[in-house]
Image: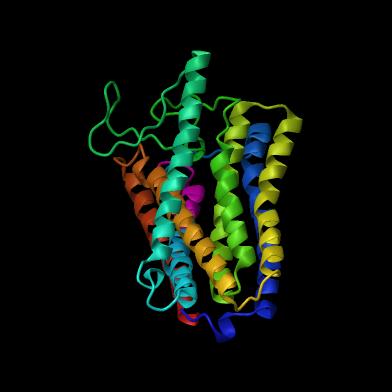
Amino acid sequence: MEIEGECRGDAATLPLKLAAIAAAIAAGAAGVAIPLARRQRRLVKSRGGIGGGGGLAVGRAIAAGAILAAGFVHALPAASASIAAAAPRGGIWSEFPLAKFAAMVAALGTLAIDLAGTRRHDEGREEKGNQTEAVRLVIGSPGPGERSGVIRIVGVHAGAAAHGDEEDASHPRHDVASDHIPGLGIASRSVIIGLSLGASQSPCVIGPLIIASTFHQFFEGFALGDCISQALFDRLKEVLMAFSFTVTTPAAIGIGLVVASTYNPDGLTARIVEGILNSITAGILIYFALINLIVADFLGNQRRTTDDGNRHLIWCYISLFLGAALVSLTALWD
């Protein structure tokens, strides 16, 4: 990926960053509002996973492919190029794959945050004496006392992935402890992605990241809104939580813009900051696409055995590859 020339410069990146702020606000607000509107007005009836909520499931599949491609094809190569340009020749940093290492650490760190949120939620349920059947990620065989094919999804997306009708006993439902909304993972991911967008000086990276961050913001917002709607907060608290989420990524983009203005955009500091932030963003996007979207939908499907479920699964696979292909092809113009 080219770092110099037309793919670098403040004049080209500022309009893109302003567009990213507007897209993040719109996507976040829409994502949070849909589950709340569904609860209030019953306008939308959807079920998580491939088995239900057809339009939403296909949309999630397209988003998963797009986010995965943004992480692998755009953010990670750009991070490697930026760090390589800043690394001293002949030193360890010119030989060690720092960008890929940082992406791996970011993915593992995101997993740790999600696991902590899930553990806190489970402990909250135990304290209340009102535990429900959770969705469990099973690699191989189910655990003691668990039926085959049940998936446990860590983090806030468990609520969105396992949400179903009250009367549908065949589809496990995720209840959310009202005082244990796992928002830390959402906030940290949104801040890092926003900072990376704001600090980047490469339009070739910012463009795909806008697509990925918009999808990310919408589905993170949808998952959070789903949790809020189940927790039954008072109206003021719901509004404050929704507003806080909606402005987190735009505020982080603004902070990144300010930070980027304090140093030479073509200097070593700029390249190192961009490289590290892009690496972390790549790890977060890859984790989010694989775990929160693909695993939640494709492995969490409880209706794969039906003919309709199989047809829907095929469409979702096609949508997944379509989203990945479209965003990957934009690398040809980098």
Task: Indicate left or right for 299 with 5 as reference.
Answer: left
Task: Please provide the residue range marked out in magenta.
Answer: 51-62
Q: Is residue 123 visible?
A: yes
* Residue furthest out toward the left: 141
Which residue occupies 57% across, 57% down? 193
In reply to whether residue 55 is colored magenta, the answer given is yes
Q: Position of residue 90 (x, y in %)?
A: 37, 77
Which residue occupies 48% across, 52% down? 60
Describe the colour scheme in one phrase: rainbow
Which residue occupies 40% across, 69% down? 93
282 in relation to 137, above or below: below
Q: Main secondary structure of the magenta part?
A: helix
Count the marks: how many? 0
Task: Indicate left or right for 265 with 116 as reference.
Answer: right
172 in relation to 192, above or below: above
183 in relation to 30, above or below: above
* Residue furthest out toward the right: 236
* Residue furthest out toward the bottom: 5
